[in-house]
């Protein structure tokens, strides 16, 4: 009996594949919740004739100094 025979590597390969299939199959149910739904664009506001003014926190003012 050889220590590193081709049967040993074949059995390890088969075991690895079967183990991976079991792990993937066990986690497959939780994937639906982990996958995000498609992004939805915001609806455009109705045209009011004028553009709304930006809020004060987004206005860039020159630095006095």
Image (tube, helix red, strand yellow):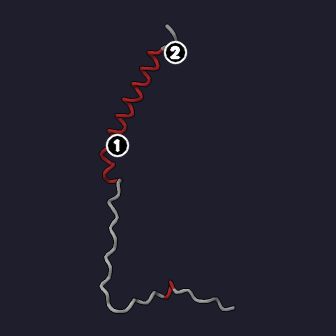
Look at mark 1 in the image and give the residue it sits on: 27
For label 1, the crowd category at 10 Å Cα-Cα, with few meaning under 14, some 14 to 19 and many 20 or more, is few
Residue at 47% across, 15% down: 6
In whole angstroms, how far apart are the C-alphas of marks 2 and 1? 33 Å
Residue at 32% across, 43% down: 28
Residue at 46% across, 17% down: 8
Residue at 32% across, 54% down: 33
Q: Are marks 2 and 1 in contact (CB under 8 Å)?
A: no
For label 2, the crowd category at 10 Å Cα-Cα, with few meaning under 14, some 14 to 19 and many 20 or more, is few
| Residue 51 spot, x, y in % from top left | 39, 89
| Residue 63 spot, x, y in % from top left | 64, 88
- Please give the label number shown on residue 59: none
Q: Nearer the viewer, residue 23 or 37?
A: 37
| Residue 64 spot, x, y in % from top left | 66, 92
| Residue 48 spot, x, y in % from top left | 32, 90
Mark 2 or mark 1: which comes first in sequence?
A: 2
Quadrant housing residue 47: bottom left
Quadrant housing residue 20: top left
Look at mark 2 in the image and give the residue it sits on: 4
> In what element is the residue under mark 2?
loop
């Amino acid at each position: 009996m050889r220590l590193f025979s081709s049967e040993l590597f074949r059995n390890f390969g088969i075991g690895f594949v079967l183990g991976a299939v079991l792990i993937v199959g066990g986690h497959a149910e939780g994937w639906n919740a982990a996958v995000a739904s498609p992004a939805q664009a915001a609806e455009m506001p109705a045209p009011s004739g004028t553009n709304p003014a930006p809020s004060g926190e987004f206005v860039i003012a020159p630095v006095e100094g």
